[in-house]
Amino acid sequence: MTKTDPETRIPDPIELDAAEEARLRRVAGLGAAEAAAVGGDYAGFEQVGLPDRPPQTEREREVYTLDEGEMLVNMGPQHPSTHGVLRLVVKVRGEVVVDIDPVLGYLHRGIEKLCENATYTTVLTYVDPMDYLSSMHNEHAPAIAFEKLYGIRAPKRAEYIRALVVELNRVFSHGLMMGFLALDMGGLTPILYSFINRDEVVDLLSAISGQRMLFNFFRVGGVNWDTNDEFLSRLGTWRANVLKNVEMNERMITDNEIFRARTVGMGVLSGKEAISLGVSGPNLRASGVPFDVRKSHPYSIYDELEFDVITHEAGDSNARYLQRIAEIKQSIHLIDQIVDKMPHGPVQAQVPGIIRPRPGRAYGAVESPRGLYSVYAISDGGPTPYRFRMRDPSFISLQAIPKLMPGHLVADTMAIMASFDPVMGGVDK
Amino acid sequence: MDLELLLGIGRFLLATTLLLLLTVPTAFIVIQMELKIIAGMNLRIGPNRIGPSGMFQSTIHGFKVLAKEDVLPDRADRSAFTLAPWMVFMAAAMSMLVIPFAPGAIAADFNIGIVYFFAVLGLSVVGLLIGGWASYNKYSLLGGLRSAAQMVSYEIPLTLSVVGVVVLAGTLSFSDLIAWQLENGWMLVWQPIGLGMFYIASLAEVNRTPFDMVEADSELVAGPFTEYSGMRFGFFFFAEYVALFIMSGILVTMFFGGWLAPWPFPAQLAGFAGTLWGIFWFFLKTYIFVFIAVWLRATLPRVRVDQLMGMAWKVLLPLALVNLFITAIAVVVFDL
């Protein structure tokens, strides 16, 4: 190794961090002696990973002040299993998690602002990549909101096709959750079995919409395409195989002793806590609260379909997993009903190229695979929304994480997080 | 100096060289098995570009790490960081010294081979701990400490499950153990509980799924190996797979008759043919157990670190003691 000239040497970021940290401590009013008392060296590690500003809230001071024997472990944004680019600052005492601070924003694309500068028709293309595992749901809520705003209704057949694709999307999204949960516990195979199912559904959806991931299928006042032969024949094949596929995956996971030992009783969220945190969707129902937007505020054609709200009582990781499986089967049941009842007719209402709704406001909410996904749009009479706001369920679910983690082991942070099934594209918008 | 001593030294040097060379293809074969078999179980195709149906993928992996840049973290403890992969690899390679591959094909037939084997293989934990500590990385540190806790705990049930075998056969030498099994039938029949405990503990000892706490890629990125790159990482990687092979080999030697062929084949042949016959059966049996370990990896999730320790101390250790107690009583009562 050659000696580097100290003059030209690029300073090491770790050293810079240490200098910055010392500065921050001064700013934060922690003297050198006090810093040594609360921070100190843990196993020879200087405490890097502090935020680049003095603590601004009580909570921040609480997380980033270390007692003797504690250290901060920074997980993410690049980490094998933080579901995208979530960063968790984990305060640990040995292997036990003392506190956890999720840091968001690494995937922020400013989608709300983009949508406020797009016409109502093009907004539906921008929301696709938000929660990339439920693109159909992402389009559904704004479509509902804009239709209310403009005062039209989609034709009956369009509503049925919407419900069909949305339920298909839910099946693969929940299926992937099974795989990711197992993957975060070190099981290699279930995720690939999940992807078999996802691939079939994605083929289906691409047969009807023309695209595999960001479907761009919904329109204000209808859907882009009617069903076609390829879609229908694939739907038949998929319907014949899907339960077999889900069961194959279930056999790998559900009754596995190790899986049960790592999920039963882990990350218990009571119904009360879940409501007060705003958690919704399968995560809420797994805590025993029977709230399903499809049932309590029916939209589209859900009031014409027969289904019950499924709940599980335990509220732990295992209940959240079983809830997903039950909902997969429920969605397949719904798909059967939709296909049986589907009427003939047009799939698109008469809508001008550029929509200019009257000034007003509208709210559209759907049950996405991750919970209550809703859109609030304000029109000022122009061709673009004046304000466009989205409530993403993953973002709300993440609030539960710092509440649930303390006391669990480092290994469980990932397992519990995976059981909430957050998608960072939706969290950061 | 007398000729016999010189010959002995020459034979020993030759044998150790051969064994060191053997580690390379062994690691390649085990890695290739892992790539292809797990792919098959995942319903994937797996590597299929290099060589016929991807046969040389792992070889290319091996040579790739040679060509990669070797990064030394700025704050790492230099000497310890360099020493760690070497220690882990040598612990695995040195323990191969006492493995009996076939009649006459054993590098050093110690009369305390079993003691030597577990003593040397246990050294690898020191390497992992040093590597985790020296890397100046929190994932590495946690991984290193986990490995220390895990391997120290599992060493005890592992060794205790072997003591039953030793008491029964009345020997600490691997070749005597095989001779005993030739006479009395495979140890599997005599020590079924010991076999189960040995298998579980050996998986934990070589850090295989479901006990791969040390790497735990979904939590600790790569545990103590996080900061390693290039050939240093390659040594860890090699050592891990060689250790899996060795553990399977020892399992076969202790419980499945080592090089002995199963009935209805003749258990042993004379002369050079006997050596080949023995090598064939030894490798066949060993790779069956390597296959099972790979199969487990494709099937099971990982247990948590506290569940792992709980299992070692609360289940395996009492069971091993009971097993040993029963074995000892039986040996005395029935005069085995």
Image (tube, rainbow, N blue to C red):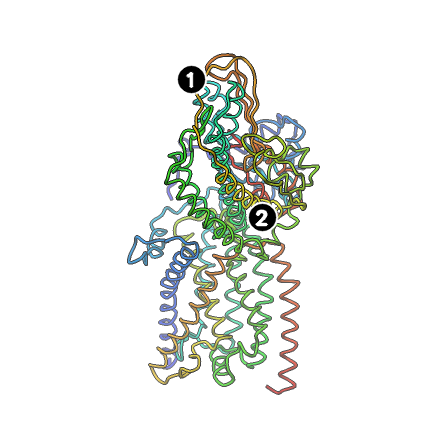
Amino acid type of the residue tagged 1 in the rendering: Pro
Q: Is mark 2 on a helix, strand or loop?
A: helix
- Give the residue at mark 1: A352
Indicate which label's residue lies in the foreground, 1 or 2. Answer: 1
Question: Would residue B223 be visible to someone looking at this image?
Answer: no
Residue A68 occupies quadrant: top right
Q: Residue A411 carries which label?
A: 2
| Residue B40 seen from this side | yes
**Sooner in the amino-acid sequence: mark 1 or mark 2:** 1
Three-letter code, disc 2: Ala
Q: In this view, does B48 lie to the left or right of A171?
A: left
State the CA–CA distance, disc 1 to disc 2: 54 Å
* Residue B97 locus on image (x, y percent): 44, 70
Furthest residue in direction front, as rendered: A344
Residue B211 vertical placement versus B73 (above, below): below
Task: Tell me the chain of label 2.
Answer: A
Q: Residue furthest right?
A: A272
The foreground one among B292 and B20 is B292
